[in-house]
Amino acid sequence: MIENLTAFFIRPVELVAHYRTILLFLVCPSLGALGAWLIAGTAFRERLLDVPNQRSSHSVPTPRGAGVGILAAFVFAGLTLRIPTTFLFAAILISAISCYSDYFRVSVRFRLVVQVLSTLILLFPLLPRLSANFSQSALGGYPFLFLLVLAVIFLFIIGTANFYNFMDGIDGIAGLSGVIGFGLLGACSLYRAVPDSFQTPLSLLAICVSLACLGYLPFNLPRARVFMGDVGSILLGFVFACLVVTLSRDYLEMVCFAALLFPFYADELTTMAVRLRDHENLTQSHRRHLYQLLANEFGIAHWKISAAYATAQLAIGVGVLIARFFGLPAVLILLTVCFIGFAMLTVHVRKIADRRGR
């Protein structure tokens, strides 16, 4: 027992002590900051500016596309850690079209096609591992249920990539969520007692992405000098979902790891429900997220809203990681309570906003 506990705490220290890991932990935040600094320095180029419109939550033209630094950190870490080539290629592909769309018009249909292709590139080589982790025995021996699981995973990856993009609407919210979500995901998966040559590099990759977001943050908080852009937000959502799928060894872990981004999912799902109720086109831009209402209708400072979301994310994430020791039912009960609470808050805020708008 004592030996197991000793190994539990010593192994991460040994990993971090490795010179390659130290190099990664220094270079990744530097690349995140460098990308933001370079984009901030090209503000005179009109194509790089995000000009405010009626849907914006900012009032000053601001350079966008600073997520290229996070992309550079991801690629550097991926090559150094030798993560699966298909994972790296899929992320670069989806980032390339996202980067292009930051400056040029790209149809929603074409972007969706690229996202589907990137997800298929990632999932196909993982089928044997996914089959082992989410085995038919756990599904009652029905093969078609595993196909249903694959469909859910497919939608989860594409949905998370877009959800993250939709939530990147005020200063600091995407960067802070990246620091906390990827940090918790990497740290939790790294603290496994048995080393895994496949999952350990992915755990370190998650920490590297978290550090890249940390390097980017000073340029986006408390008042944004640059915006992450689609190249950063879609990349973060895609990579987060992919890491959740690849690092999860069973259903319990997958639910717990996905819940590390809980505020984003809760805000997006409640907003989608409201827009569907009002017969709105879900592909069109809007200002109906809870964070947008708080910023635009109530005038709350962006950094305060982002800090509140980050605090909720950290608290719920830690709570879920603790609840997982009591099994899947405990985790689902906790998430249900949190979602109901978030939905009630959303309804209350929307009612006040509607009264003010009359």
Image (cartoon, helix red, strand yellow):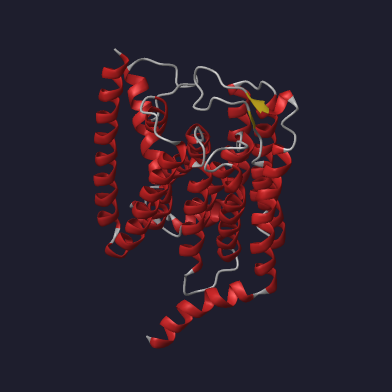
Left or right: 36, with 262 as reference point = right
Residue 281 x/y as whole percent: 44, 17
Number of labelled discs?
A: 0
Residue 50 in sight here = yes
Give the camera-side residue of 4 and 145: 4
Give the camera-side residue of 315 and 56: 56
Residue 153 x/y as whole percent: 47, 43
Give the camera-side residue of 223 and 112: 223
| Residue found at the very far bottom of the displayed protein | 2
Residue 42 x/y as whole percent: 75, 34
Residue 17 x/y as whole percent: 62, 76
Give the quarter of the figure containing the C terminus.
Answer: top left
Q: Quadrant of residue 279?
A: top left
Give the quarter of the figure containing the N terminus.
Answer: bottom left
Relative to 333, does residue 55 appear above or below in the rendering? above
| Residue lying at 59% horizontally and 73% vertically, measured from the top left | 15
Left or right: 221, with 117 as reference point = left
| Residue lying at 67% horizontally and 62% vertically, measured from the top left | 26
Q: In which quarter of the image is residue 295?
A: top left
| Residue found at the very far top of the displayed protein | 358
Residue 132 in sight here = no
